[in-house]
């Protein structure tokens, strides 16, 4: 596990499994977590770091979305209140790539909300807001005092992963995040990055939409599967191996669900949220 300190009281712990992370906000002797790692081994290491190294107790765990690769720590802090969107079960039941280990990660939330929720934690105020796109239960967490925005998995690096909703919803979700105008963005994988990544993800969706529509018009599935990640990202923004893994999955989803297949102009317009 790698720990990156963003401020004296906000840290990001990045695990080995899927680079899934947990954001750790410290207040006195207590901790609030955002997300909970992707494996039991990473979650155990997170617990040791918090309880032994920091000598803190976890009071709340906020789930950005209820996918199993972010839930491993939920059952390891039994005294913590788990906060999630009211549609968390919709997200859990829609997951396609859950491992046998991850089946054991589920723990029900103790607090749910629909539209928004505010938490005051030390010097920070966290605004939790419903931001459906990646999943129907995805939330954003805005921390203005740290100029920080947690996007869940609405973007992955400099791209967006379309599998569990529609391109239109993803585009709208990214647009809502961009309107927050924060300097730093966190997602549920990896470390923090400049919020320009949100603009890169918007551009990625628009380009992918146009290329997919043309590929369908030219003959279909094999043309879709040959679309390269780097050809969809903005110029000068290289794709990573982690991003490419999800790009390839996304191409399979586009073929399966016929996203962008029927009318190029409609597809381009639907995702025009730059």
Image (cartoon, helix red, strand yellow):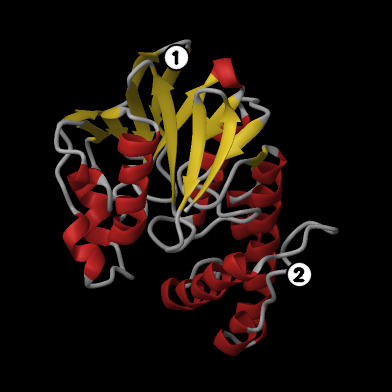
Which-is-in-front pick, marks 1 and 2? 1
Label 1 crowd (10 A; few <14 / some 14-19 / many >=20): some
Residue drawn at x 47%, y 54% is 1
Q: Is residue 60 left or right of residue 108?
A: right
Q: In this figure, which residue is indicated by the disc labeled 2?
A: 231
Inter-mark Cα distance, 1 to 2: 39 Å
Residue drawn at x 20%, y 45% is 76
Instruction: Please give the label number shown on residue 253.
Output: none
Residue drawn at x 50%, y 67% is 259
Relative to 106, residue 226 above or below:
below
Whether residue 53 is visible: yes
Q: In this figure, which residue is indicated by the disc labeled 1?
A: 125
Q: Is residue 166 left or right of residue 119?
A: right
Tell me residue 80's x, y (percent). Answer: 20, 31
Relative to 153, residue 208 above or below:
below
Question: Mark 1 falls on what kind of element?
Answer: strand
Label 2 crowd (10 A; few <14 / some 14-19 / many >=20): some
Tell me residue 108's x, y (percent). Answer: 14, 43
Whether residue 39 is visible: no
Q: Is residue 163 left or right of residue 52?
A: right
Question: Mark 2 falls on what kind of element?
Answer: loop
**Depth check, front residue: 35 or 40:** 40
């Amino acid at each position: 596990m790698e720990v990156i300190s963003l401020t004296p009281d906000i840290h990001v712990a990045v695990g080995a499994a899927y680079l899934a992370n947990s954001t750790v906000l410290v207040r006195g002797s207590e901790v609030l977590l955002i997300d909970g790692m992707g494996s039991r081994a990473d979650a155990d290491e997170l617990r040791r770091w918090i309880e032994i190294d920091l000598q803190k107790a976890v009071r709340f765990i906020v789930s950005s979305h209820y996918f199993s690769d972010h839930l491993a720590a939920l059952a390891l802090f039994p005294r913590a209140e788990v906060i999630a969107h009211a549609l968390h079960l919709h997200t859990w039941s829609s997951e396609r790539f859950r491992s046998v280990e991850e089946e054991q990660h589920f723990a029900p939330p103790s607090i749910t909300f629909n539209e928004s929720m505010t938490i005051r934690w030390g010097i920070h105020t966290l605004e939790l807001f419903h931001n459906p796109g990646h999943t129907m239960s995805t939330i954003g967490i805005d921390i203005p005092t740290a100029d920080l925005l947690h996007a869940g998995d609405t973007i992955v690096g400099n791209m967006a992963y379309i599998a569990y909703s529609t391109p239109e919803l993803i585009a709208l979700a990214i647009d809502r995040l961009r309107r927050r105008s924060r300097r730093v963005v966190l997602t549920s994988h990896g470390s923090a990055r400049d919020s320009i990544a949100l603009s890169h993800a918007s551009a990625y969706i628009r380009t992918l939409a146009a290329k997919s529509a043309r590929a369908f018009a030219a003959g279909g599935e094999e043309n879709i599967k040959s679309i390269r990640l780097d050809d969809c990202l903005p110029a000068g923004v290289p794709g990573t191996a982690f991003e490419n893994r999800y790009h390839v999955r996304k191409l399979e989803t586009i073929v399966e669900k016929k996203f962008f297949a029927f009318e190029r102009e409609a597809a381009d317009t639907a995702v025009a949220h730059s």
